[in-house]
Amino acid sequence: MQAASRRLRQVVIVHLPLADETGLDPQTARDLNQAERQALHFANATVATSRWTAAQITEQHGLPEARVHVAPPGVHLAPSAPGTPSGGRHLLSVASLTPRKGHTTLLAALAALPRDLRWHLKIAGAQPDASYATHLRSLVTKEGLTDQVEMLGPLAGAELDAAYAWADLLVHSPEKEPWGMVITEALARGLPVYASDVGGVQEAVGHAHFPGETVLERPGRLLPAGNSAAWAEALEEWMCQVRLRDRLRTLAEQRQRTLPTWRTAALEVASALRAFPSTPWHTEGRTLGSGATGPCRA
């Protein structure tokens, strides 16, 4: 990049800062951070996929804010998932089977639920680490969940659409997440989302107005990463309270209208390529106030 910078205009897209990957030893993390810093300073502009990532790399690497663009991934609206008669027992996880995605937290939470709560979890996602996938399967067996947990492998197209249509709730429990396209893909189908409160997840989940009300609420729940007890409590509440499920489903359907589009993403990337200054993301609130009401209680 240093050599090319004399003759080319270089634009770099950053999703997750390299040193933030889970499981790196300290020296590797330092080396990656240094290499990323040098590369981004040789670049003419950087495109981040969330305001959270933009803030991270601007602070860590000392980049001029006007050269850092934010282009959240867009989403195509899809037919609303019909849901099931029970309304809340079909859970879907869409994430590659890697430690950063936090499947162990989700499985521990489900194992802690009362045994008379009947639910079914489908896990869709690539399995780049065979040993970790084996570990998750052994954990499912150890917890006695083999009849309730399916690992489907990677899905795309009609198969992935069918998985979303089957679901009542998207569950996404990463330890780190710069955005979470599966979140907006679920919301595009009117599915509520329970997700870890990390990185750019707040931006992806967003807010919505319940019809006839003025307070902004989340179309789901943001939960502490790695805290299986908090996840178990939230999932039990979801499964046992019809009014909560109905409200979150309505909020998810309202959130469909304000999801990011591929057109807005393309326009921001085009601005970076044309050497225009970035849309002033740094003058906006980097994290919106939740504005959410407390959990419904019977």
Image: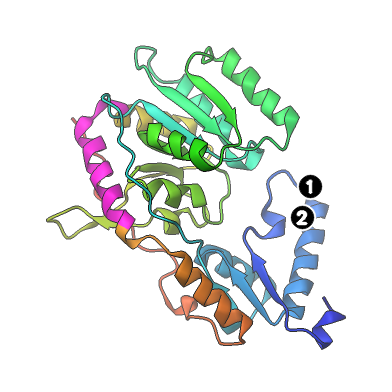
Residue highlighted by disc 2: 29
Do callouts 2 and 1 mark residues in contact (Cβ within 8 Å)?
yes
Report the disc number at residue 25: 1
Q: Tell me, yes or no, if residue 172 can be seen here.
A: no
In this rendered view, identify the residue nearer to me: 225 or 208. Answer: 208
Report the magenta residues as a range. Answer: 239-256
Answer above or below: position of 173 versus 183: above
State which quarter of the image contains the C terminus.
top left
Q: Is residue 85 left or right of residue 60?
A: left
Measuring 67% from the left and 77% from the top, which residue is drawn there? 62
Measuring 77% from the left and 79% from the top, which residue is drawn there? 42
> Badge 2, how many Cα within 10 Å: few under 14, some, many 20+?
some
- Mark 1 residue type: Asp
Which quadrant of the structure image shows residue 33? bottom right
x and y, in percent, of residue 210 in the image: 19, 52
Disc 2 to disc 1, how far (Cα)?
Answer: 6 Å
Residue closest to the far right: 3
x and y, in percent, of residue 79 in the image: 34, 46
In the rendered structure, does residue 247 fall within the stretch colored magenta? yes
Q: Tell me, yes or no, if residue 95 can be seen here.
A: yes
The number of callouts visible is 2
Measuring 32% from the left and 44% from the top, which residue is drawn there? 80
Measuring 53% from the left and 23% from the top, which residue is drawn there? 150
